[in-house]
Image (tube, rainbow, N blue to C red):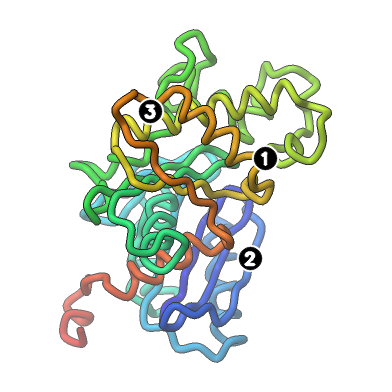
Amino acid sequence: MELCIDFGGTEIKLAVIDDGGILGTAGVPVSGDARDLIAARTAARELVARTGASPTAVGIAVPGVVDPASGQMLHANDKYDFLRGFDLHTWAREQLGLPAAVENDARAALIGETSTGSAAGERDAVLVTLGTGIGTAAMIDGVGLRGRTGHAGILGGHVTVDIHGPACPCGNVGCGEALASAWALSSAGQSTIREGLSVKDLFRSDDHTEIREGFLDVWGATVVTLIHMYDPSVVILSGGVLRAGDAVRAPIETYVREHLWSSVTAPRFIVPPEPEYSVARGLSTLARNAPPQTPEEQETH
């Protein structure tokens, strides 16, 4: 039985999972500072008490680069900058009494969907989450890509789509995330027509057709690049905006088929029926299989 904590863009999402089944969930708004750790601890304790659960480990997802050795954040966006270098393993032991597995959120979501989710059994897959930013992850021959320092596969949203585009906080220019994400809509210098506009709003009416079509083209170009890099058999499209279903998936798939390298076999596109649980399912798998981290845990493992 595992406790799962996902530090998301607007909400900290929690779940208790037992043998693949979700026993209970909870969520708290993100403050963007160290108060989020207190909120996560309180919500976790309340969820465990409410469900009567006895988790043996906790999986923690963060929207940033995770060091494979220490499990610490090497880089995060401004909202979670307070977690940079923070020891979440020690925090979990001291505040929750549990050993922890820590992972990038998109990579955890990919593990969730390819283990027990919509792409179960797939061994060559790419996942793209669309929303606050553009999160990506990749798997080749059943192995999730991590790389030497944990960056491999997760920076697909920071591939240049427009060389003359805006500067991105990552240091690059014209990134997909800088052009087509929630924070891109609200960033300084954008047209006043975008004030208060959310990514989901683009697909709720036809009031912003030009902006919506621009976003879809950027997302399509991003997916084409990921397919050219990783040659997946499936592309999993996830994130809150995918509640719009075919209004998002179909234009992206069309763009991909029109721009893909001629000899590449087009992958299958999947939209998870429950994208809100992708990360939690992956964290459950990671926490259940995580190696012991302390001498005490090693003795009881």
State which tag comes first along the sequence, 2 or 1: 2
Q: CA distance from mark 2 to mark 1?
A: 28 Å
Judge from the rendering whether residue 68 lies leftward or rightward of residue 134; answer left or right: left
| Residue 49 location (% of width, % of height) | 58, 87
Q: x and y percent of residue 196 in the render? A: 78, 33
| Type of the residue with mark 3 | Thr
Which residue is denoted by mark 2 in the rendering? Answer: 27
Q: CA distance from mark 3 to mark 1?
A: 21 Å
Q: Label 2: how many residues lie within 10 Å, few (<14), some (14-19) or many (20+)?
A: many
Which element type, helix, strand or loop, lies under badge 2? Answer: strand
Q: Position of residue 299 (x, y in %)?
A: 16, 85
Amino acid type of the residue that numbered disc 1 sits on in the rendered structure: Ala
In the picture of the structure, the residue carrying the numbered disc 1 is 247
Helix, strand or loop under label 1: helix
Q: Nearer the viewer, mark 2 or mark 1?
A: 1
Q: Which residue is mark 3?
A: 225
6 versus 222 height, above or below: below
The vertical placement of 131 against 287, above or below, is: above
